[in-house]
Amino acid sequence: DGGITQSPKYLFRKEGQNVTLSCEQNLNHDAMYWYRQDPGQGLRLIYYSQIVNDFQKGDIAEGYSVSREKKESFPLTVTSAQKNPTAFYLCASSRTGGGPSGGEQYFGPGTRLTVT
Amino acid sequence: AQSVTQLDSQVPVFEEAPVELRCNYSSSVSVYLFWYVQYPNQGLQLLLKYLSGSTLVKGINGFEAEFNKSQTSFHLRKPSVHISDTAEYFCAVSSPDSWGKLQFGAGTQVVVTP
């Protein structure tokens, strides 16, 4: 089955530690995205990548970093500089970034990160 | 810049009753419009989309939505809901030049009771 996997489902970290969230897709999609979800705020875009070895900041990139070394993988690192990292993180992909297909995104199951 | 407003944060509805979820958007350019559904502790799933053409679009699970350009709205409807429709619903907008950057509304929680 084609899809997006995110691991782990739940992640606990101490304040001051960096943590990396995994996202893998086998849909052969060019574009990938990371969103943060907080209650009552919808989804906010952290980073996106339209092609391998290229990525751009979204609306709330401060305190986060990404890499896109392989088409199928787009890991997100939450650094100690992120002031409020506790949230639900969702990874998504689309066939391409441009045009209407960019909005047709396939989402992973999410990782719930708790930092104490 | 684009923005999306979902007018109801929560909509309670009885099983087999109709439901309408309201979505308004603002944009200075032509838009693509989407509705996504999120079941508890899961990712989002695309329900339906408006790209161009017919203003009434049908999606999965019996949902439909109507694009109204003059009112800048894209309301979602279902004539008869099931308990399994209990979920959060998100309206989202993008444009031809936004390169996949979706702007999401804050979401509407639908609670279906027997």
Image (cartoon, coloured by chain):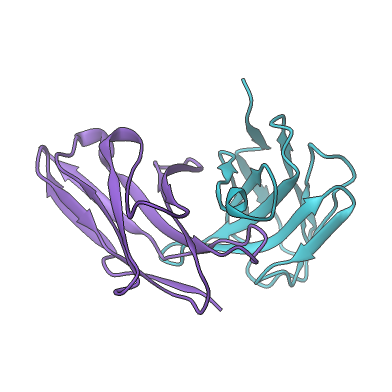
Quadrant in which the N terminus of chain A appears: top right
Q: Colour of chain A?
A: cyan
Q: How many marks?
A: 0
The quadrant in which the C terminus of chain A is found is bottom right
Q: Is residue A24 left or right of residue B13?
A: right
| Chain identifier, purple in the render | B
Taking depth in this image into account, of A66 and B92 the one nearest to the observer is B92
Q: Is residue A67 rendered to the left or right of residue A63?
A: right
**In this rendering, is residue B15 above or below A14?**
above
Give coordinates of residue A20: x percent, y percent.
77, 49
Q: Position of residue B22 (x, y in %)?
A: 27, 63
Identify the residue at horizontal 79%, vertical 40% (top origin): A73
Query: In the visual, does A46 lie left or right of A44?
Result: right
Quadrant in the picture for residue A85 = bottom right
Residue A47 in the image: x percent, y percent?
Answer: 72, 61
B111 or A79: nearer the viewer: B111
Q: Residue extending furthest top? A: A1
Answer left or right for A76 relative to A59: right
Query: x%, y% of residue B66?
Result: 29, 56
Q: Quadrant of residue A80?
A: bottom right
Residue A47 to residue B114: above or below:
below
Residue at 43% of width from left, 49% of height from top?
B49
Furthest toward the front, the residue is B53
Residue at 40% across, 59% down: B91
